Image (tube, rainbow, N blue to C red):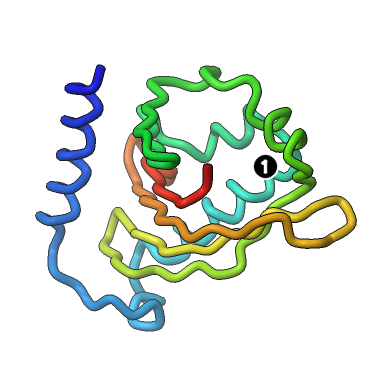
Amino acid sequence: MKTQLSAIGLALAAACANAPQQQTASAAFEDCAAYNPAMEITDRFMQTFNARDMEGWEATYHFPHVRIASGEVSVLPEAGMRTDTFDRLVETGWDRSAWLSREVVQCGPDKAHLATVFVRYRADGSELSRFDSMYIVEFKNGRWGITGRSSFAP
């Protein structure tokens, strides 16, 4: 399994290294073909997450879906592989999450990389935690989706 995960990590790194060299200021990408779809799919990601709508949330993914967090690389080969995500978060005091910032840092005709910060909130509106993260949004199989994400969240 570690070999498979290492290969996936190397593939992600190679994909980024082989990407066309582009400017890295979000405003410079507002006219990029992937800019608006990347913002729309990450909006939907957050909306369905907060609604605790697992099916809708996973509909924002491409599969296999890669998540790098907590010193681990998780690969979800298909939808329906996670069942306790929301319960585990509620146990920590989580009520909802929101984007604090999202910036397109690389963009092309069918892919965008977003540097983000998201905040987790308690029911009383106080901040529970915040984390920097990176999202990879791509157009493939006829639709936009999130292929992978890496965050400092547990």
Q: Identify the element where label 1 is drawn.
A: helix
Task: Report whether 125 appears left or right of 120.
Answer: right
Residue type at mark 1? Thr
Seen from this angle, which residue lies furthest right? 124
In this rendering, is residue 139 above or below 65? below
Residue tagged 1: 48
Percent position of residue 96, x then y = 75, 49
Task: Report whether 6 appears left or right of 152.
Answer: left
Residue 72, by quadrant, is top left
In this rendering, is residue 105 above or below 65? below
Percent position of residue 94, x then y = 75, 45
Looking at the picture, tell me which residue is in the foreground, 126 or 44: 126
Residues packed near mark 1 inside 10 Å, few (<14), some (14 to 19) or many (20 plus): some
Looking at the picture, tell me which residue is in the foreground, 54 or 30: 54
Residue drawn at (73%, 28%), measured in percent from left and top? 87
Residue drawn at (70%, 32%), measured in percent from left and top? 86
Percent position of residue 63, x then y = 39, 29
Residue drawn at (39%, 77%), measured in percent from left and top? 26
Can residue 82 be seen here? The reply is yes
Task: Report whether 85 appears left or right of 69.
Answer: right
Task: Report whether 4 appears left or right of 114.
Answer: left
Residue 53, by quadrant, is top right
Can residue 143 be seen here? The reply is no
Residue drawn at (72%, 55%), measured in percent from left and top? 128
